Amino acid sequence: SQTIHQWPATLVQPVGSPLSLECTVEGTSNPNLYWYRQAAGRGLQLLFYSVGIGQISSEVPQNLSASRPQDRQFILSSKKLLLSDSGFYLCACSAGDLLGTNEKLFFGSGTQLSVL
Amino acid sequence: GENVEQHPSTLSVQEGDSAVIKCTYSDSASNYFPWYKQELGKGPQLIIDIRSNVGEKKDQRIAVTLNKTAKHFSLHITETQPEDSAVYFCAAPGGSYIPTFGRGTSLIVHP
C-alpha cells in the first residue's frame, strides 16, 4: 500500500521568510497528489492538486505555490510567508483500487506551520 | 460541483454508547463514499468506505449505510471506546477524482 513521507512535522517561521514543504510517496506510480491546509478545529481546504509531473492546479488563489518535479514528489512553497499561512498542512495521494478508481485518499502525517 | 453537508459538528457520548454521524451530498454522479478518522496532530486515515451498489457495509464496530435516493450516508460506531475520540470526515467525489469533504465531526467519548 501507499506510504506518504512528509516533513518537517513542526515548523516555526518568521513573517516574510520563505517556505518549502516536501512530500514523497512510495508504493504507487503516477498518483494524483494533493496539498490540503487545515486551520485549527476546521475542515480540509484543498490548495493544490497534480495529476502528473509538472501539472499543477490551484484551487485557492494565495501566497503559496506547488511543484511536482518527479512522479512521486510534491513540494509546497512560498517566497514570503504571511501570518495567515499558519496551519496544519497535509499531503495526500490517491490510489487506484480493484475498480481502477482514484477516489480513496492516503494522507501524510502533516506539518504544523506557525508563522510568527 | 458536489456539496457535502455533515452533522453534527460535535458529538459527545459515554463509553459504550453508539454514535451516528450523517452526511448528505448533492451530486447524483457520486458513487463512492469514504469516511476518514483524524486523531489529534495526525493526518486523516480511511476507516471505512462504501460504493453506491450496496446499502450497508460493516467492519467490526463501525458501519456505513447509504441511501442513494435520499442522497445521504451515515457512519455508525457501536460500543464506543475512548480511543474512538477523534474528528471524523465524510467525503463524496461528485463526478471528479477530487473528493469534496464534509466539515468534520468532533467525537468525544467520555470514560
Image (tube, grey):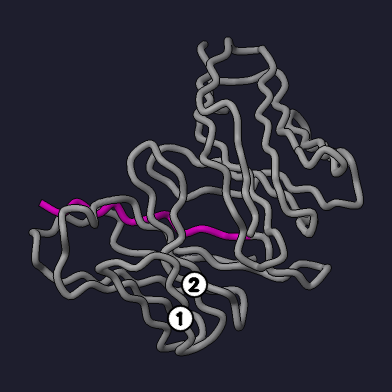
Q: Which residue was labeled with disc 1?
A: A56
Q: Which segment did they paint magenta?
A: A105-116
Which image quarter: residue A65? bottom left
State the quadrant of the N terminus of chain A. bottom right
Placement of B87 over or under B2, stated as above or below: above
Which one is in front, A108 or A44?
A: A44
Placement of B96 over or under B106, stated as above or below: below
Kind of residue indicated by mark 2: Tyr
Q: Which residue was labeled with disc 2?
A: A49
Q: Residues within 10 Å of mark 2 (few under 14, many from 20)?
A: many
What residue lies at 47% left-to-right and 77% top-to-bottom? Answer: A57
Q: Mark 2 lies on which chain?
A: A
Placement of B80 over or under A16, stated as above or below: above
What residue lies at 62% left-to-right and 49% top-to-bottom? Answer: B3
> Percent from the top left, x then y, of residue A98?
82, 68
Secondary structure category for the residue under label 1: strand
> Percent from the top left, x then y, of residue A97?
76, 67
What residue lies at 13% left-to-right and 59% top-to-bottom? Answer: A13
A34 falls in the magenta region: no
Which one is in front, A44 or A1?
A: A44
Placement of A4 over or under B43, stated as above or below: below
In the displayed structure image, the side of residue A47 where residue A99 appears, left or right: right
Which one is in front, A46 or A13?
A: A46
Find residue B91 and name its label. none
In the displayed structure image, the side of residue B1 where residue A110 appears, left or right: left
Which of disc 1 and disc 2 is earlier in sequence? 2
Q: Are marks 2 and 1 in contact (CB under 8 Å)?
A: yes
Which image quarter: residue B24? top right
A108 falls in the magenta region: yes
Q: How many labels does the image show?
A: 2
Kind of residue indicated by mark 1: Ile
